[in-house]
Image (spheres, coloured by chain):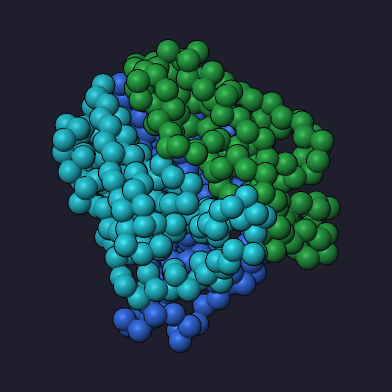
Chain colours: A blue, B green, C cyan
Amino acid sequence: MKLYTKYLWFDTKKRQEFINITAQVESAVIESGVKEGLCLVNAMHITASVFINDDESGLHKDFDVWLEKLAPCGKEKYSHNLSGEDNADAHLKRTVMGREVVIAITKGKLDFGPWEQVFYGEFDGKRKKRALIKIIGQ
Amino acid sequence: MKLYTKYLWFDTKKRQEFINITAQVESAVIESGVKEGLCLVNAMHITASVFINDDESGLHKDFDVWLEKLAPCGKEKYSHNLSGEDNADAHLKRTVMGREVVIAITKGKLDFGPWEQVFYGEFDGKRKKRALIKIIGQ
Amino acid sequence: MKLYTKYLWFDTKKRQEFINITAQVESAVIESGVKEGLCLVNAMHITASVFINDDESGLHKDFDVWLEKLAPCGKEKYSHNLSGEDNADAHLKRTVMGREVVIAITKGKLDFGPWEQVFYGEFDGKRKKRALIKIIGQ
């Protein structure tokens, strides 16, 4: 049984950003030596997300517009922000997009369909944050 | 340590459909020989979902109405559709419903509560698509 | 390879409640003896959720208000409720919040970022319900 752990660091220039991390996850799988198993990738911060979708810039704009509609930003809109925070909307946006993905590893590779790509979704950036890769298998 | 991989194929008649795949997942657990472990089931396409909920037709209608309200279809509504696609809403609907589930296997069975059933959720169907089952355990 | 299973019971006083179960999950990790692995925590009922976010009461109020906006309660609003149920909204709320989390275990501990806490989210309470912890690793 093999286990492997890796941390990815992010420090985005914008408050909200989607970063394709598929290549980093693929590298971690190779480094782990695991041929068959599971690969967990999760945000380690509660205003960020790891999700799987298409690497298409129009769709990413759609995500921005859609998330703003579902959970608009605004300091005065949320009870959480009474505690001095201004990021309640980021907690809600990350909830929609999800904290984590679990990916099958088959024959030494991420077992992906034709368009699956892994993204780190930042909703309260401009500071150092981490995602975690944990691989288990043989 | 045992590992087992299986692919399920779908080709729905309607654009949007929910298909109960619990029996197929149960069969895969038996085929794997795993008595204690984890079972990942995920959509391999980014306009489809695997989720766990109730097998009740009224609720499935409610999901349809609700997802249409949260992420309405419409070619002109989304930037993604400028690229020639017409399925941006399907990407958003799948995001709400989730890409994957991870299910515990205990004493050789899916360790489910009283009403848990696994569904493949299609949001841009009428073509061949796959879901993946990956089982790890002993 | 070590595997460990534990069930947590809940019987909330209110219909909707968020309960911090981080300490119980940490105890299960110690009881499992697993130093490196994965920990699945999932609701076993389809009107409840397990999710990771901040333990801040203002944010929890924001979740309440937000979920009510996305999926308002109301017996007459949903087809599911024609079957005699009154909890369709709870199925939708749980869908937004998610059924499960998968957490990495590193050096014998939940490998968490600075503010990550695990919650049981109840959306149709006042009766006995369960969550499941399944740990796999070495």
Image quarter where the N terminus of chain B lies is top left
Q: Residue at image x 27%, y 26%?
A: C3
Please state the horizontal and vertical placement of residue C25, each as a whole percent of the image.
Answer: 24, 45
Q: Residue at image x 34%, y 44%?
A: C130
| Callout count | 0
> Toward which corner of the image does residue B47 lie, by quadrant?
top right
Please state the horizontal and vertical placement of residue B22, each as a whole percent of the image.
Answer: 56, 29
Q: Is residue A15 above or below residue B81?
A: below
Q: Is residue B69 above or below residue B134?
A: below
Please state the horizontal and vertical placement of residue C107, each as a whole percent of the image.
Answer: 19, 39
Q: Residue furthest bottom?
A: A76
> Toward which corner of the image does residue B104 lie, by quadrant?
top left
In screen coordinates, is B74 left or right of B42? right
Q: Is residue C97 visible?
A: yes
Q: Is residue B39 above or below residue C98?
A: above
Q: Is residue C107 visible?
A: no
Q: Is residue A8 above or below residue B42?
A: below
> Toward which corner of the image does residue B110 lie, by quadrant?
top left
Q: Residue at image x 42%, y 23%?
A: B109
- Which of the two residues, A40 or A21, is positioned nearer the viewer here? A40
In screen coordinates, is A56 left or right of C73? right
In screen coordinates, is B65 left or right of A86? right
Image quarter where the C terminus of chain B lies is top left
In screen coordinates, is B79 left or right of C61? right
Please state the horizontal and vertical placement of residue C35, each as a whole percent of the image.
Answer: 20, 34
Q: Residue at image x 42%, y 37%?
A: B113
- Which of the two residues, C128 or A130, is positioned nearer the viewer here? C128
